[in-house]
Image (spheres, rainbow, N blue to C red):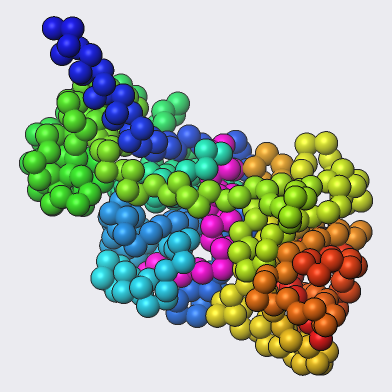
Amino acid sequence: MKKRILSLLLVLLLLLPAIPAMPTEAAELPEGTANLDFSFTSIDGESVSTKSNGKPKLIVFFMPGCSRCKYTLQDFSSSSWLANGEADVCAIDFRGYTQEEIREFQETNCPEGLIQFVADDTGNATFAVYDYLHADGNTSGTIATPVVAMVDVNNNLRYVVSGRTVYASEIEADYLPNLKGGNSGDEGNTPGGDEGNTPGGDEGSTPDDGNKPGDGSDDTISGNKPGEGNTPGGDEGNKPGEGNTPGGDEGNTPGGDENNTPGENKPSGNVQAASTSAAAEEVKAPEIPSTSSVGTVKTSVAGAYLATNVNGSIVATAEADIAKNYGLADNEKVYGKFSDFSAKKSPLAKAAMDAAVAEQKAVAGPMLNIEFGKMSAGKYTQLPSDGAAIRIVLGIPKNFKQADKTYAVICVRAGGAYTVLKDLDNDANTVTFDTTGGAGVYAVIKY
């Protein structure tokens, strides 16, 4: 008996690292939580903003290979509330898929053409999804897809849900009234259910209006496509429900919450039967590097250091000095963003940079997006571009080093205006320059 118990404990210990993070629930954010402001270009060349424009907006951060993302977007796309123009929906890829790949996903799963799709390869969408999760208090560094941010008519961020299929019916019943300006759901309840009822929110009913789990008469549980007739809890890679017991979580009763009976937790708002296949739809890397170094010197400012085309990037000015110079409050922290520049996504900036490089009779090397802002309670705000100097050091990549050349940096700001920033050090391995807050495109040049 002791051997059997020890064997079982060993199996449990081996399984523990594979247990995925649980999805986040849609607890309403504090009243007046300002929405985040990001802009993209859709695969059809249209401008896409995360801001609402007089009606609710749902922002879905997704990956094409994520089944929960697919079912969520399929359901939204065919909904009556979207067809009637009651809300706007945009779907933003944050993993760098091509426009062709995202268009194929759209045509296959959302042929109605009512959702704006974005294929982003600049890193901006990665910043956005992390910022939305941070605004909801999620700083784990793990993204469980899809991430659905819900914005009301006044451009306030109201809900962020991640890691589960979100159905059009629950949007219509539980969220839209509040996003339009009414009360959310039933007073005092978490969106998605009637207090004390089993999943589905119908008083006194068992899950799915009295249907037996898996009979296909209503939505299935745990991220399978609604109404497919599958048993609850199909794991990714299997045909939905294939060989799985109801709930999809090994050894659990239907409902999928460990040791719970069906619907024991918050009705309809929690992900029932979240199987271990969820791990395949979580993004644990790349967790955005919050620090960087050039040689042995570390940056002074926390941020998102995604640039890979230089040999390190750091802010040399002390954070306290930047905070003082830009008038930051005690609860505000300086935040820097460094990422590789994409000419495909920003052709006008590339054209302006090419013209500037030609005027300087120089050779352009690595190009970066660099931006400075401030963080407060998970909310990011850009610093002004006319403030005090902020010193940056970039490591020159080996393939761009040349002993007999002079180095500098060109910065192109909004509108195409550029500035040549002189190299302030004598180190052949680095270029050091002063810039200011705000956003710009930067290129290391030599001549």
Q: Is residue 190 left or right of residue 339?
A: left
Residue 245 in view: yes
Within the image, what quadrant is residue 294 found in?
Answer: bottom right
Q: Is 126 inside the magenta-drawn segment?
A: yes
Q: Nearer the viewer, residue 354 or 81?
A: 354
Q: Is residue 439 visible?
A: no
Query: Residue 218 in the image: x percent, y percent?
Result: 16, 44
Stretch in magenta: 112-138
Looking at the picture, does residue 445 appear above or below residue 371? below
Q: Residue furthest top?
A: 1
Q: Quadrant of residue 367?
A: bottom right
In the depicted structure, whether residue 44 falls above or below residue 221? below
In this view, 416 is above or below 373: below
Question: Which residue is at the front of the view, 228 or 104?
Answer: 104
> What residue lies at 46% left-to-right and 66% top-to-bottom?
96
Residue 89 left/right relative to 200? right
The residue positioned 63% from the left and 63% from the top of the image is 307
Figure label count: 0
Counting from the top left corner in percent of width and height, residue 225 is at 21, 52
Q: Position of residue 427 (x, y in %)?
A: 84, 66
* Relative horizontal placement of residue 243, taking residue 126 as reference (left or right): left
Q: Residue at x 69, y 60 (%)?
A: 312
Residue 129 higher or lower than 45, as above or below: above
Relative depth, front residue between 318 and 157: 318
Q: In what quadrant of the picture does the C terminus appear?
A: bottom right
Q: Look at the image and tell me in which quarter the N terminus lies.
A: top left
Question: Looking at the image, which residue sits at the far front?
Answer: 403
Between residue 269 and residue 209, name the one nearer to us: 269
Q: Give the residue drawn at x 43%, y 37%.
A: 24
